[in-house]
Amino acid sequence: MLSVRTARIFRAVLANRDLRRVELAYAGFNGAEYAVWIAMLVFAFGRGGTNEASFVAILQLAPAAIFAPFLALLADRHRPVLVLFGGYLVQAAGVGITAIAIAADAPVPIIYAGAVIASTAITITRPAQAVIVPSLARSAEELTATNVVSGWVESGGVLLASALTGVLLAVAGVDLIFGLVAALLLVSALLVVRVDGPAPSLAGSEDGGPSEALAGFAALREHSHLRLLMGLLMGEFLLWGAVDILFVVLALDVLDLGEGWVGYLNAAFAAGGMLGGLAAVTLVGRRYLAPPIALGALACGGAFVVIAVWPSTASAVLLITLSGAGRLVLDVGCRTLVQRTTPSEVLGRVFGVLEGLEMAGLALGALLIPPLVALGGSKAALLGAGLLLPVLAALLARPLIAVDRSAKVPVVEIALLRSMPLFAALPAPAIEGLARALEPVELPAGTVVMRMGEEGDRFYAIAQGEVEVSRDGTTVAHLGRAAGFGEIALLEDVPRTATVTALTDVRLYALEKGPFVTAVTGHAPAAQAASALVSQRRDELARLAAEGS
């Protein structure tokens, strides 16, 4: 049974026609993305084994990696809703071509061409949606509720789509799967075509070319610790790219379970990732990250080593779940260490490069399996791929420990943010990034920190002391350590709704509007907490107004 809060979130999104259409379309896209990937690998494996499955994986990933940075600019240069609509249409067309070609026994190049078109167009969806959603929300509650729903769609998409694809592969052909996915993407396109979205933000601008990506690579050349961490993450991406083909090999060659089990094994890996997300919360504020990074690498890769030695259905499911959890812990640990050790002026460009490396790593990972199968068979492929991350982590252990020990961790600021419900649910990289962005502010008693009616530009967290919140001269609340204020003006883009005065000498931490809004609205649990806090503050102000009338 849905909780009251969960039902309220869904009602907030469903009440806004445009948000409802965008989210339903996104749900269809999310399921289609994973279903197409799994079905195409199974089809290619059935035709030519691991060699062809790997080739098709590269064929889909390489163009997406190359064109993604440029396609992402479309939503800034053209009307985002039309870009999103066009992206869904192109995806539907590509998948539809593949479905018809398979059913008609058409030449293989036509079959694969449709899949390449669809996979390349996938890179349009998320950037376009990121531009559209804030313009559609009519209040902070609607915006945060939409982000909560998007988070649920993302988290459950891999698991649900993998499981359903497994069932369909067991009872029907891949052409039916592609046909259903094409229809689903057409529905997504029809859902968004009449949405009222924003105007393009960079119409006619020539900025934003490839120079930013090149600047990110320059930062890697200048900082050796970044190359080390990117090397570990690249190892993760290589194994991640290999696992899809490994699942085909494991299900059909090693365990002889049938095509449906390719989807089930993918679902187990996705479930492990969800469990790993819970484990990764313990990394927040942790002084040293090298140990959990090493454990994540060992679990992610070592699971496949054990499967190669002890291949059974039960152990495979459990170990693949463990691998998915280990991958998530490794990923969060490395990304957090990147944030701890990278100068703030180059951090954005470095993470931009990381997105490109991820696509390249996934593509290259798919190339690993055919040579391993050719050299020693399916079990050798499992063993070789599984050893990649543990061996890489062992080789890089000494410099990783050195980087870890030299990293600057804002322990006090992290502890303060973790004690605040608004930020407590943020993942480790996000909360540590915010802690690094905090600016200390010390004020004597009697100082007006912010005044009602002023433009809001900062959020404040109270580290020490007490403040009074008032409206039109009437006290609304007293706030102390681990409380915050200023969020309504930032989230709803309105003037300050109350005056805040220091009752005692106070030590505050200020957070600029940009990083605050990005962090809170970009992560589902934090968005949910923000929505609850804004509603609470609004209720307090409304009650005060009613008592005064």
Image (tube, rainbow, N blue to C red):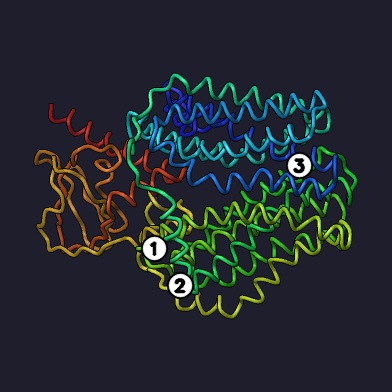
In the image, 370 versus 511, the foreground residue is 370
Residue 235 found in image quarter: bottom right
Question: What whole-number distance in Å separates the C-alpha atoms at marks 2 and 3?
Answer: 38 Å
Question: What whole-number distance in Å separates the C-alpha atoms at marks 2 and 1?
Answer: 10 Å
The quarter in which the C terminus is drawn is: top left
Q: Position of residue 251 (x, y in %)?
A: 84, 46
Mark sitting earlier along the chain (2/1): 2
**Label placed on residue 346:** 1
Whether the residues at callouts 2 and 1 have beta carbons within 8 Å, the answer is yes
Note whether residue 475 is visible.
no
Q: Which residue is mark 2?
A: 223
What secondary structure is marked by label 2?
loop
Disc 1 marks which amino acid?
Answer: Val
What secondary structure is marked by label 1?
helix
87 vs 497: above or below: above
The residue at the point 47 percent across, 38 percent down is: 148
Q: Which residue is mark 3?
A: 41
285 vs 357: above or below: below
Number of dots carrying numbers: 3
Disc 3 marks which amino acid?
Answer: Leu
